[in-house]
């Protein structure tokens, strides 16, 4: 499946039909120096293996391809797929589930062709966004379906990106606070694009081009959203994660005007930071949390002031093997949850979720589970203080509380 998706990039299609403002020398641009604050590990960790709950399995046994939780209810949604023949036939589905019982509640759609279904996320007021890769005569036709709301357990409409024949979503910002959501994507020339959209209404704001020398797919840009200031928040490795390379770049883009504000992030010698693996923000406090690949650190930035501090993951001692991957934010309780697929504490070979407050203090570490892959997906419901993480098998999600 991943091979098929990668092949899409090689298709030669028409250029963008919708003109988009370009962030250039003529566009308002602010660059400020980074002020590095105190760095280092702070706080005590507390193992919480008993916080691990039930394990959910997909109904068709397929690998999970995207999932999310409603922050204002008890529903969740996931995509599932598995290849069943050498010719590329795929059993794929979209399924809803119950957050509390960790059980599938309905198979919304099921196909047994070459099609794929990928859940991009839940946005706004329980609006599900689902990618449908529809294959006809070995050509992929990409479309997006909506579930408004997910609790209806069915598709209710469509969402149309800018020039759908020449656009690939990289990331949909985690945002269930307002109706407009930031999206980062690429055209088939690897030009990075960022814009705001109301998925439920199928409307788009202005589309802005980012600098492909800093935000291309090879740089691994990460996206979050400041919902109070109408900002896309980005963190990227401007030299594709080079060992001993440049520091991460932290940026904000005004989703109405395109105004770009950026500063260099923290790099920790001797290898420096490498790729930015995860990003989450708290709009109220304008604090961003990132993880970086080469130093096994977690960074906390005030992205309006251009200040930052780095904190080592507990027991990692800068070892890349223990680096953090995904980050999710709980703005209600002022927490960031950091995933370590290879845990640096707890039972050997297990995974860890490290929970930090917004000052970089380690609050607790959840141990006793195994995540799937080195980049497992994670989603939380901050109201319930409950979440799910991919694993221990490709078709499973493990429930946890924190």
Image (cartoon, rainbow, N blue to C red):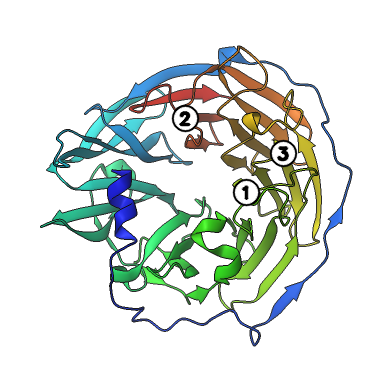
- Residue 10, image x, y percentages: 32, 62
Question: Quadrant location of residue 48?
Answer: top right
Cα distance in 3D space between marks 1 and 2: 22 Å
- The answer to whether 376 appears left or right of 43 in the picture is left
- The answer to whether 87 appears left or right of 149 in the picture is left
Residue for badge 2: 388
- The answer to whether 99 appears left or right of 105 in the picture is right
Asked if the residue at tag 3 contacts the one at tag 1, i.e. Cβ–Cβ closer than 8 Å, the answer is no
Please give the name of the residue rendered at 37% of the width and 36% of the height, measured from the top-left corner: 75
Q: Which mark is residue 312?
A: none
Cα distance in 3D space between marks 3 and 2: 26 Å
Q: Which one is in front, 305 or 236?
A: 236
* Label 2 neighbour load within 10 Å: few <14, some 14-19, many 20+: many
Reply above or below: 340 against 34. above
Reply above or below: 175 against 297. below
Residue for badge 3: 295
Residue, far right = 38
Please give the name of the residue rendered at 88% of the width and 48% of the height, measured from the top-left corner: 37
Q: Secondary structure at mark 1?
A: strand
Question: Quadrant location of residue 271?
Answer: top right
- Residue 71, image x, y percentages: 48, 41
Q: Quadrant of the N terminus?
A: top left
- Residue 31, image x, y percentages: 76, 71
Whichever of labels 1 and 2 marks the residue nearer the N terminus, that label is 1
Please name which of the two marks, 1 or 2, marks the residue nearer to the observer. 1
Residue for badge 1: 276
Whichever of labels 3 and 2 marks the residue nearer the N terminus, that label is 3
Q: Quadrant of the C terminus?
A: top right
Q: Secondary structure at mark 3?
A: loop
Q: Secondary structure at mark 2?
A: strand
């Amino acid at each position: 499946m991943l091979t098929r998706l990668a092949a899409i990039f090689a298709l030669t299609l028409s250029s963008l039909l919708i003109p988009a403002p370009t962030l250039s020398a003529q566009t308002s641009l602010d660059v400020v120096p980074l002020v590095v604050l105190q760095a280092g590990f702070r706080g005590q960790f507390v193992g919480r293996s008993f916080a691990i709950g039930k394990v959910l399995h997909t109904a068709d046994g397929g690998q999970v391809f995207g999932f999310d939780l409603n922050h204002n209810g008890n529903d969740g949604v996931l995509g599932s797929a598995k290849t069943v023949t050498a010719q590329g036939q795929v059993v794929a589905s979209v399924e809803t589930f119950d957050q509390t019982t960790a059980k599938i509640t309905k198979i919304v759609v099921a196909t047994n062709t070459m099609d794929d279904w990928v859940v991009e996320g839940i946005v706004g007021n329980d609006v599900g966004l689902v990618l449908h890769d529809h294959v006809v005569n070995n050509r992929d036709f990409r479309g997006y379906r909506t579930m408004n709301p997910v609790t209806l357990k069915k598709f209710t409409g469509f969402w149309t990106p800018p020039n759908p024949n020449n656009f690939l979503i990289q990331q949909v910002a985690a945002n269930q606070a307002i109706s407009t959501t930031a999206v980062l994507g690429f055209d088939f020339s690897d030009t990075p694009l960022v814009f705001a959209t109301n998925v439920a209404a199928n409307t788009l704001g202005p589309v802005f081009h980012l600098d492909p020398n800093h935000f291309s797919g090879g740089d691994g840009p990460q996206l979050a959203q400041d919902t109070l200031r109408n900002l896309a928040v980005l963190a990227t490795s401007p030299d594709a994660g080079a060992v001993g390379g440049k520091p991460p770049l932290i940026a904000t883009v005004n989703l109405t005007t395109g105004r770009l504000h950026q500063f260099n992030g923290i790099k920790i010698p001797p290898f420096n930071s490498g790729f930015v693996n995860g990003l989450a923000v708290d709009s109220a406090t304008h604090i961003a949390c990132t993880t970086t690949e080469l130093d096994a650190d977690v960074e906390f930035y005030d992205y309006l002031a251009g200040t930052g501090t780095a904190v080592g993951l507990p027991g990692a001692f800068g070892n890349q093997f223990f680096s953090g991957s995904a980050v999710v934010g709980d703005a209600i309780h002022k927490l960031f949850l950091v995933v370590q697929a290879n845990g640096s504490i707890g039972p050997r070979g297990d995974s860890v979720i490290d929970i930090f407050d917004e000052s970089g203090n380690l609050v607790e570490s959840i141990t006793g589970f195994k995540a799937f892959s080195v980049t497992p997906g994670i989603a939380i419901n901050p109201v319930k203080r409950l979440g799910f993480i991919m694993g221990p098998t490709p078709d499973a999600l493990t429930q946890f509380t924190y």
